[in-house]
Every structure is written in C-alpha cells, then in structure tokens.
Amino acid sequence: MELHSLNITEAAALLRKKEITSRELTTAVIKRIEEVDGRVKAFMTLTPELALQQADAADKILQNGAKDANPLLGIPMSLKDVLSTKGIRTACGSKILENYVPIYDATVARKLYESGAVMLGKNNMDEFAMGSSTENSSYFPTRNPWNLDTVPGGSSGGSSASVAAGEGFFSVGSDTGGSIRQPAALCGVVGLKPTYGRVSRYGLIAFASSLDQLGPFTRSVADAALVMNVIAGHDPKDSTSINAPVPDYTKALVPNLNGMKLALPREYFIGGVEPGVEQAVLAAVEKMKELGATVEEVSMPHTKYAISTYYIIAPAEASANLARYDGIKYGYSDPAAVEMWDGYFKTRGHGFGPEVKRRIMIGTYALSSGYYDAYYLKAQKVRTLIRGDFDKVFEKFDAIIAPTSPSVAFKIGDKVSDPLAMYLNDIFTIPANMAGTPGMSIPCGFSNGLPVGLQILGPVLGEEKVFRVAHAYEQATEWYKQHPAL
C-alpha cells in the first residue's frame, strides 16, 4: 500500500516501529498533493517547507524512543482556512481577507502543533463558511475526488476532499449547519461535529457564534478519536468553552452494540431523500441490530422548522460578526474610495461574494427595529423546542440514527442559482447545531457510484456513545476502506 493511503493509526504504528520516518511520510503526501491537487483543488495555501521542518523535529523525538509521544506525532494534516494560523495566510475563502496573515494561532492549531502533527497547508472553503458545496469560495471550487464533475459538499469541502484524496491523514473543519458532516458524507470519510463548546473556537473566524463548532475529518472512526483526544478540552480564551474533563475517546471503541438503544426519527425519512441513500441507511440500521442494538422509531416533531429557524439565526449572527470587515481595521480596503462611507460601501461591495451579501441582508433585516420580535426572537423560541425534541429522545435512547444528506454529491453548478435548493442539503444536519449536540457522519455505502453518509447523533457531551456506535458499525463493514481512483 502507498504511504498516502494509510490512516493515522496505521502510519503511527509504522513510525513507532521505525519502519518509516515522518519525513518519508510527509514527502509521500506532498508528492500526492503535487499529483492530484491540480484536479481536486482542496488547498488554498500549501506549507511544504514548514511541513518538512516539523517532520524532521518529529523524527528526532521518535529516534530518541519517545514511547509515550502523542499518536499524532509526525502525522501530516491540514486545516480549514477558517482557522487562524500564525504566519500563514488565512483568507477564509474571501477576497476581503485575501492578504490576511494572522499573528497568532487558533487554540486547535496550537494543540495540534504541540502534539507533533505536521502542517501541510490550509484547505479551500465556502466564503466565511457559508455554503453546502464549496462553490462559494471566492477563489475556485473544490471537486469531489470520487467524481471530479461533482461537489465535495461544503463549506469544509477542501478539508473533506483532501482526506478522501490522500492529501493528508486528517483535517480540521468547522460545522455551523452541517459543514463537517455533509462534506464528509459526500466524500466518503468520517466527519465529527462535537458538542458545542467541547472544542475551543478561539481563533476560528466566526460565522454564527452560537452554532459554529470545530471537528475532525479522518479516514476511520478510531482516527477521529485520536484527533479529538488532542483538540477537545476547556480553553479560558473561549468563554463558550465547556469546563469538563475530556475522556480518552479511544476507550469507547468496542466492536459491539450490546445493550445500546438507538432511535430512528421518522422526520428524517421524508420525501426528497434519494432512494439509494435511504436504502443504504436502512441497511446500516439492520447491521446495527445484528451487532446487538435495539432500534425504535421515534418522532421529533419540530425538525420541520429547523431549516427556516436556522436561516434566521445564522444570518443574524453573521451580519453582526461580519460588520468588522469595513476596509479600515484589516483586510481588503478598496483603493478607489475617497471618504469613510464611500470606503465602507466599496470595500464591502467588492470584498464580499453574493452568498455572503445575501446572508448579511437577511440577518440585518431580521435584527432590525420592528422585526426583531417577529423573526429573531421567535426563531430562538423555536430553537428551544428543537432542543427539547433531542432531550426527550435522549431520555430513553443512547443515540439517533439518520441520513447525513438527502442526496449523494451533485454536479458542480446544478444548485448555484437556486439558494433554497442548496440550503436543503443541510436539512438533516442543522437540527444538531440548533441543539448543540454532537454528530458524526460515517460511510455506509454507495449510490450511483458515490458515497452515502450515515449520521449518528448523541446527547450533549455524549461523544463516547457516538464513537461506540460508529466504530462498531464501521468495523463490521468495508465501506471505510474504499478509496477514490484519481
């Protein structure tokens, strides 16, 4: 097997047995990027020199026999361009931050560096994480490694595509309405959105602050547990960070589901779900029964309001967060402006793309005087009802099983001119963001030659239950071992 096709667990084992070095591993992945990224376009910025420096540093530790070193030591990875990285351009998919080079590292980046992970570069993304296809990047669209005519999902499409294509062993993305789980499903990899506050958001360029959460893309559930062991935990720099002990997530990886109770919400199997997706998910449910789980149908009646509620709350928060990009403090500033207001208008008019402008206008309207109670306040009340649906289910069940996306990857350009059709791609992932609960997407089959994602949702701080369900199913199937031919 070629080195770039290994997963973290396999590569770490070879490093510790000294059968390979991190420099060899990193060089193999850099070569892979050179071979395929011209077609996939998963990266915004590459940092090969930094990667080789970090690989050499990891090799020195490994040569000295550091048996207790972190499993990520010497493992090449990448980060979504939404994360601040000291000395490395962080454009967030937007022209308005085209030349922005942060002077500090996001907490997640710092933790990964300290674990010894090797930084390959920054992944392409929808502008300010707004989108479901990575066609909203201000630079170029990313393509799905399984079929280069289709999208990888979004907004973390660069991250998911890089892992699927063998351009790195893992990546970290952000999930505001499904932007880790949906692209993970469309690219056939594992994607985890942790509980809101479980992973620090310090250094994350905010889209919707009450919804944004960071999490890993990997090629196996066990790999996701290894990354979570590093990036999870309280951060005093993030006031929304949960101050609770972090378990060793690898201890949740057992091969059966004996005694587990799983819920199957009927609202997640509605008209519009592609037959191939529904068949793959229901077959996965039958496999889970074979592994010892009991599965019952449940109702989550407020699910139908999730999309409309999300598209009031998220744009409202975005309109506030993006007000800072005015051409004066930092980032792009239109040189043709002659005075302050002219500068504001021209900078924001030329710096933001159409999807970002659309959401700023929606959010500003929802927050405006006379409309706040009718839209934003009411949406927050409905959000509480959605959270109540989850709380009620988790009183009796360990986890919820559902499709991740109603369809497999669609063709590039098919939904760009229809925002509502694009928004519906996140119909099954948004509820977990509204409730703040963890969710994971894992591969569960193929439809029309493209990957299908199975979504596993757990209670707040119930990542261990999600890992157990996902790992047992994964190990009983062969889907996660499939790789795209590039």
Image (cartoon, helix red, strand yellow):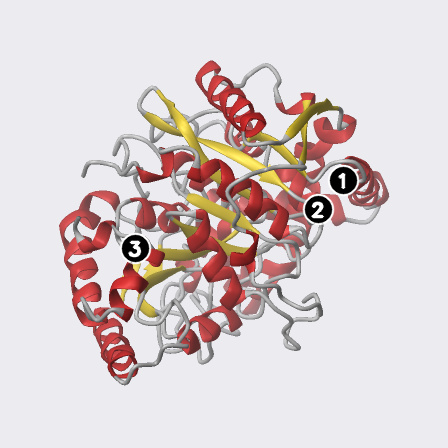
Is label 2 in contact with label 1 (beta carbons under 8 Å)? Answer: yes
389 sits left or right of 263 in the view: right
Instruction: Name the residue located 57 percent from the left edge and 60 percent from the top edge.
Output: 206
Residue named by callout 1 = 394
Q: CA distance from mark 2 to mark 1?
A: 6 Å
- For residue 92, say whether it is visible: yes
Which numbered disc, 3 or 2, marks the residue closer to the eye?
2
Residue named by callout 3 = 43
In this rendered view, identify the residue nearer to me: 144 or 258: 258
Q: Secondary structure at mark 2?
A: loop
Q: CA distance from mark 1 to mark 3?
A: 39 Å
| Amino acid bearing label 2 | Pro
452 sits left or right of 76 in the view: right
- For residue 347, say whether it is visible: no
Note whether 70 is above or below 379 in the view shown: below
**Earlier along the polypeptide chain: callout 3 or callout 2?**
3
Picture disc at residue 268 = none
359 sits left or right of 88 in the view: right
Picture disc at residue 459 = 2
Q: Quadrant of residue 235?
A: bottom right
Q: Secondary structure at mark 1?
A: helix
| Amino acid bearing label 1 | Phe
Is label 3 in contact with label 2 (beta carbons under 8 Å)? Answer: no
Q: Assess disc 2: are there few (<14), some (14-19) or many (≥20) residues with their C-alpha within 10 Å of its C-alpha.
A: many
Note whether 73 is above or below 273 in the view shown: below
Q: CA distance from mark 3 to mark 2?
A: 34 Å
Q: Assess disc 1: are there few (<14), some (14-19) or many (≥20) residues with their C-alpha within 10 Å of its C-alpha.
A: some
| Rendered-image quadrant of the C terminus | top left
Q: Quadrant of residue 98?
A: bottom left
Q: In the rendering, at what x and y percent does residue 377 appear?
A: 83, 45
